[in-house]
Image (tube, rainbow, N blue to C red):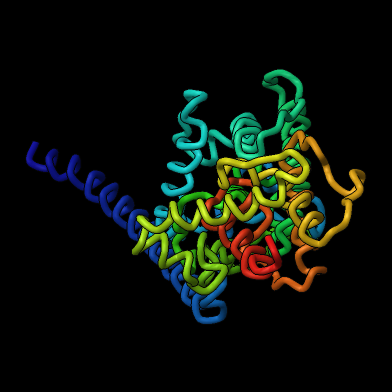
Amino acid sequence: MATSPTSTLTPKKKDESFLDKLGGTLARKKKAKEVSELQEEGKHAIEAPTSPTVPDIGPEGYTLDENEERSMIEPQSRDDPKVRDLIKMLLDWINDVLADDRIIVKDIEEDLFDGQILQKLIEKLAGLRVEVPEVTQSEQGQKQKLQIILTVINRILQQSPPWTQSKWSVDSVHSKNLVAILHLLVALARHFRAPIRLPENVSVNLVVVTKRDGMLQPRRVAEDITTVNEDIGARFERDAFDTLFDHAPDKLNLVKKTLVTFVNKQLMKINLEVADIESQFHDGVHLVLLMGLLEGYFVPLYDFHLTPEDFDQKVHNVNFAFELMQDAGLAKPKARPEDVVNQDLKSTLRVLYNIFTKYKGQGL
């Protein structure tokens, strides 16, 4: 019986030795694999230190056609304070414009991608009606609706030369591309002279993925959203009207009264009269008629819209009046036609004062 414990212990020791040996082999293999992976990562870091990793572009990203591209904003750029400030400012502006419709926009990407908010926004800003199908849940229906709305927006924004349609598209807006949507909203804010001061030098980093030879190839690109001195109110140097508005508002009514008197001396010849500069010149009709009276000619009715019905027709009228002014030897107005149409008082005063300065002493 004395040998019994020995006989029972010997096999057990043999089993432990085998397991230890097996465990050691697996550990060494795991360690070797980790070292190999680490070496590979180090080699990649040395050979391509600036190469961006392919971000999560979703299942649709891998269905790109050959040479097709898809761009995504880097998370760090999305969290940049300037980008956040710009988004908040644009959201506040949109909600202010749509306040009467009791519409509250909380997320630029989620709330604007299907075109419904964009439709309301451009209708309100431009004073027009966009005829689109009723609300639809299908992707195809949403894109068709968005196409109509963006066509209207692009037609209006073409009057502002710096903006091009290539910065946004139906696909980019519908896919909730933040950069495309920001470009679009900044263009609208500038075009319609939104009462906000856009932050300068807002830029984002994009990862642009291109499919070549069946492989996704990423590259990093910097994209400017705003630059220096392109914000609202920075188009021209300050002048006497800036000083008047900022430091002598008490004299503003005197200037307005002087200009109204000057204008009415002419318009009364054709039984017209204005009482409010800000609202009665915004459609361009009185400006066109005034230039014809001052220069002594009849303006053909086919050259302008006597009863303009939408924003585009009003801008056409003001543009035409500006052309008549320059033909008469006046300096190019320090205002955009869109500013006058949007009833920007300072811009309208600049235009009228420019006319007043030239004609005030001609036996009026």
Q: From the viewer's perspective, is residue 210 above or below residue 142?
A: below
The x and y percentages for residue 245 are: 41, 59
Q: Position of residue 12 (x, y in %)?
A: 23, 44
Of the pair 319 and 13, the residue shown nearer to us: 319
Q: Nearer the viewer, residue 160 or 199?
A: 160
Query: For the point 53% across and 56% down, which residue is it?
Result: 258
Q: Is residue 187 above or below residue 106?
A: below
The residue drawn where x is 27% and y is 50% is 14
Task: Determine which quarter of the picture holds residue 356.
Answer: bottom right
Q: Quadrant of residue 22?
A: bottom left
Q: 126 or 176: which is nearer to us?
A: 126
Q: Tell me which residue sits at (41%, 53%) in the image.
A: 84
The quarter of the rendered structure image containing the C terminus is bottom right
Look at the image and tell me whether residue 165 can be seen: no
| Residue drawn at (65%, 43%) of the image | 173
In percent of width and height, residue 97 lies at 51, 36
- Residue 355 shows in this picture: yes
Determine the residue located farthest toward the front in the rendered image: 363
Q: Nearer the viewer, residue 37 or 127?
A: 127
